[in-house]
């Protein structure tokens, strides 16, 4: 296996591809991952907040039918495998960006697949807030919006950042799969060279770069989460 990988100038060929095509692919992967995560958070944050505070005994009780709809809607989107979802949302993707192929087009299914996941993560982060803190603020006459904006979100911020870090690494793995429908980035290179042309060394390089990206995103997210955690600051 190893002999075949490095035989007949395959290593030099892989290095040439690494120099010429990988820089753009790396940029496309980072660009799509960050942008898709941003939109997923923009959509998933309010949904996650509503799921956390809209229960009968919550800060902002919502009608049972609304909560049931949100719960089923989020679970439904989360249950669809990403490869199938990419195909299902072709009409929406074409409506928004004018095409179903390419780097920009892959952002639409990425956002649709990831915002329910982000919503559940944010819901979990908000539910971790000490209920005694919420009761104390309620006793002072704070409105539901004030409790959400000034208590729940700030108190759960370190946990939210930690969970968004999990989400961004998940979205990064989705970008690799989007290469199947013509999405750009490292996934496209891995599929085009590793799967279709049997250039496995190129695919290995792509996988290594994806692993490095995951480590970078994870390290940055962990550092932000730790620095924003007031409990750790108080211990210091």
Image (tube, rainbow, N blue to C red):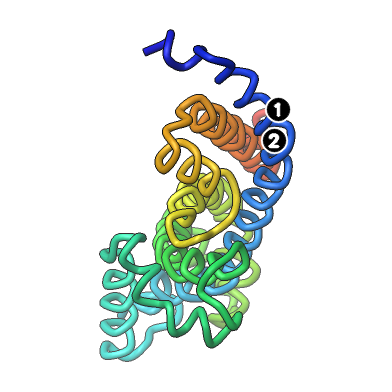
Where residue 174 appears, as percent x and y from the top left, is: 45, 52
Q: Quadrant of the C terminus?
A: top right
Q: Which residue is mark 1?
A: 236
Classify 26 as above or below 28: above
Residue pointed to by mark 2: 233
- Say if residue 163 shows up in the picture: no
Secondary element type, mark 1:
loop
Alpha-carbon distance for marks 1 and 2?
A: 5 Å
Q: Which residue is at a point 36% across and 13% down the rendered structure image? A: 1
Where does residue 115 sit, x and y in percent of width and height?
47, 67
Asked if the residue under mark 2 is in contact with the one under mark 1, i.e. CB atoms within 8 Å, the reply is: yes
Q: Residue at x 34, y 72 (%)?
A: 74
Task: Indicate left or right for 64 with 186 as reference.
Answer: left
Q: Residues within 10 Å of mark 1 (few under 14, many from 20)?
A: few
Give the quarter of the image for residue 223: top right
Which residue is painted at 63% across and 41% down in the image? 221
Q: Position of residue 39 (x, y in %)?
A: 60, 69
At x 35% / y 68%, what residue is drawn? Answer: 85
């Amino acid at each position: 296996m190893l002999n075949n990988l490095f035989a007949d100038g395959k290593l030099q060929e892989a290095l040439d591809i690494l120099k010429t095509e990988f820089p753009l692919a790396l940029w496309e992967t980072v660009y799509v991952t960050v942008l898709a995560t941003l939109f997923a958070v923009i959509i998933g944050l309010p949904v996650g907040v509503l799921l956390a505070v809209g229960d009968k005994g919550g800060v902002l009780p919502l009608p049972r039918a609304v909560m049931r709809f949100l719960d089923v809607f989020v679970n439904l989107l989360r249950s669809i495998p990403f490869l199938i979802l990419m195909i299902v949302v072709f009409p929406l993707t074409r409506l928004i960006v004018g095409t179903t192929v390419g780097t920009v087009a892959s952002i639409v299914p990425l956002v649709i697949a990831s915002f329910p996941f982000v919503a559940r993560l944010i819901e979990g982060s908000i539910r971790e807030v000490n209920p005694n803190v919420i009761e104390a603020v309620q006793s002072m006459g704070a409105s539901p919006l004030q409790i959400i904006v000034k208590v729940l979100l700030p108190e759960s911020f370190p946990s939210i950042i930690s969970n968004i870090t999990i989400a961004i690494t998940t979205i990064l793995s989705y970008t690799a799969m989007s290469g199947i429908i013509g999405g750009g980035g490292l996934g496209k290179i891995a599929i085009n060279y590793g799967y279709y042309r049997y250039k496995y060394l190129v695919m290995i390089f792509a996988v290594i770069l994806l692993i490095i990206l995951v480590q970078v995103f994870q390290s940055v997210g962990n550092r932000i989460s730790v620095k924003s955690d007031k409990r750790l600051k108080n211990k210091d």
